Image: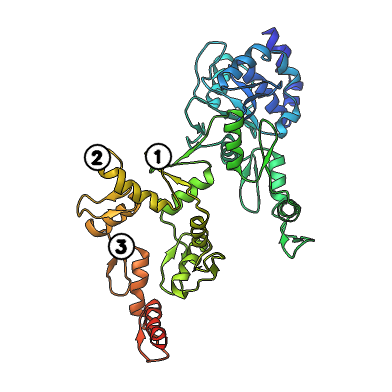
Amino acid sequence: MYLSCLILGTPGTTKKAVKRRRYLSDIQKNQHNLRTILLYSNANLIKKYDASGFGCQFCTQQFSEPKLLKEHFLREHKLQQLVKGITCKLFNFFVKLDITDLKCTLCDQRQSKLDHFIYHIKAQHDIDVYKRLKSSIVPFKFDTEKLTCVECGKEYLTFKHLMTHMNEHFKNHICPTCGKGFVTSDQFKVHVWRHKSAKMKCKYCDKSFANQDRLTNHQRRVHLGDKKRNKCNFCGKKFADYVHKTDHMVKVHGANEVFAVCDICDKRFKDHRRLNVHIRKDHLLEKKYECEVCAADFFSASDRKRHMVTHTGEKKYQCDICKKSYGTKNTLREHMRGHLNDRRYKCELCGKGFVHNCTLRSHMKLIHFKDNVHAKPDFALCHICDKRFKDEGLLNVHVKKAHLLEKKYECSVCGTDFFSTLDLRRHKVTHAGVRFECDICKKSYVRKYTLVEHMRKHLDDLQ
């Protein structure tokens, strides 16, 4: 008890002591609570967690596993750092507390949450703690394969994303403009500053930005050539892309390779951004961009732009070697591989190289798949009608539409049901009474793309 009084200070019950405690700031109360938690539990602080490991809050040592950091903290820093290490400056940042296998050191009773532990030491051991305050002590656990939020159970690929998410649970400071919450006042002030409406113009071009931070990033990246913003945690080398940085750390420094795994189809991606695009595109079937000619929907503006070539027939990308023309830059790039004999697609079974991936797939099907009944086919087979599809996503759409006859979207005019919003939108044109007329023969059509197909016949006749 003498040791705890020395470290924490005697709470005191006199009127003077109670009055003094009443006027303590939230940071001072957080200081007291953190010292109490560290003194009476096996919890430990974390300075950082990245590809290089878990960093100690009180020294420069790093550890490959959280349990090694915990052992180090309890052995080297448990007592001597509680007074001098828990300063007000510590609460300017995330105070990251590892509560894996949390237990009370007074009675060895385990606690699943930090709030439960605080209630326990107050109720069972009569230890003074502050409850009604904006807590800056953010708990984390490292007892699962994925990084998991201790409050709601959400999983994250990186510790950085998990820390950003924790702002949703510890809304100590709330932005009056957008309602976002933040753990620390520094995070809150930076965020509010970004809402400033004053436009700052770039001196190199005509673009304007909402604040100095975004303007500076734009100038460095676009005009000053500082595109390498992703820094290696080991050697400090910079990379233009996050994926290139992680590849470098895995190959050069032996860091563990981290993947973002899709919970629906188990596909693996090198970062969360690519995983999110995959989920929105392949599983949620998100299509915000509509073709003005045929009403087809597309996931991105670039997908729609590539599609428009099928209507315009424009081929503005010409090969400098054979003078063939193509509608898109990607098609021309694939064509150029043939001239350069770039056989980047290798067969894993026989080592033969191919210019295009589709040629490799045909090779596997014709040469290897027919001789190997155990090989996995490169198509998805419908077991009802034996139709083949490129992937499982297209097969699922086919089964729902053709066999389950799933029709969720009803026409408000005639009551007919349709499988997708695209089918419904195409149907509604028949009720609109709008027809597209040919300027040459005066024939009219319900759909614009039908008129475009018709006009091509006139062009063929003129040639």
Q: Residue 76: where, in percent of width, then height?
A: 67, 13
Circles 3 and 1: CB atoms closer than 8 Å: no
Q: Residue at x 50, y 51 (%)?
A: 342
Quadrant of the image containing the C terminus:
bottom left
Q: What is the residue that sits farthest to the top in this orientation?
A: 2
Q: Quadrant of the rendered structure where residue 229 is?
A: top right
Q: Which residue is mark 2?
A: 373
Considering only order in the chain, which callout, 2 or 1, is on the residue closer to the N terminus? 1
Left or right: residue 60 versus residue 447 is: right
Q: What is the residue that sits farthest to the left in this orientation?
A: 384
Q: Look at the numbered disc 3 and give the secondary structure of its residue.
A: loop
- How far apart are the two marked residues, 3 and 1, measured between alpha carbons? 40 Å
Q: Residue at x 63, y 15 (%)?
A: 72
Circles 1 and 2: CB atoms closer than 8 Å: no
As drawn, the label of residue 348 is 1
Most foreground residue, 138 or 50:
50
Between circles 1 and 2, the one closer to the viewer is 1
- 84, above or below 175, in the image: above
Q: Residue at x 63, y 32 (%)?
A: 135
- How far apart are the two marked residues, 3 and 2, measured between alpha carbons? 36 Å
Q: Tell me, yes or no, if residue 165 can be seen here.
A: yes
Q: Residue 173: where, in percent of width, then height?
A: 66, 42
Q: Residue at x 36, y 49 (%)?
A: 361
Looking at numbered disc 3 in the image, what kind of residue is underneath it?
Answer: Phe
Looking at numbered disc 1 in the image, what kind of residue is underneath it?
Answer: Glu
Looking at numbered disc 2 in the image, what kind of residue is underneath it?
Answer: Val
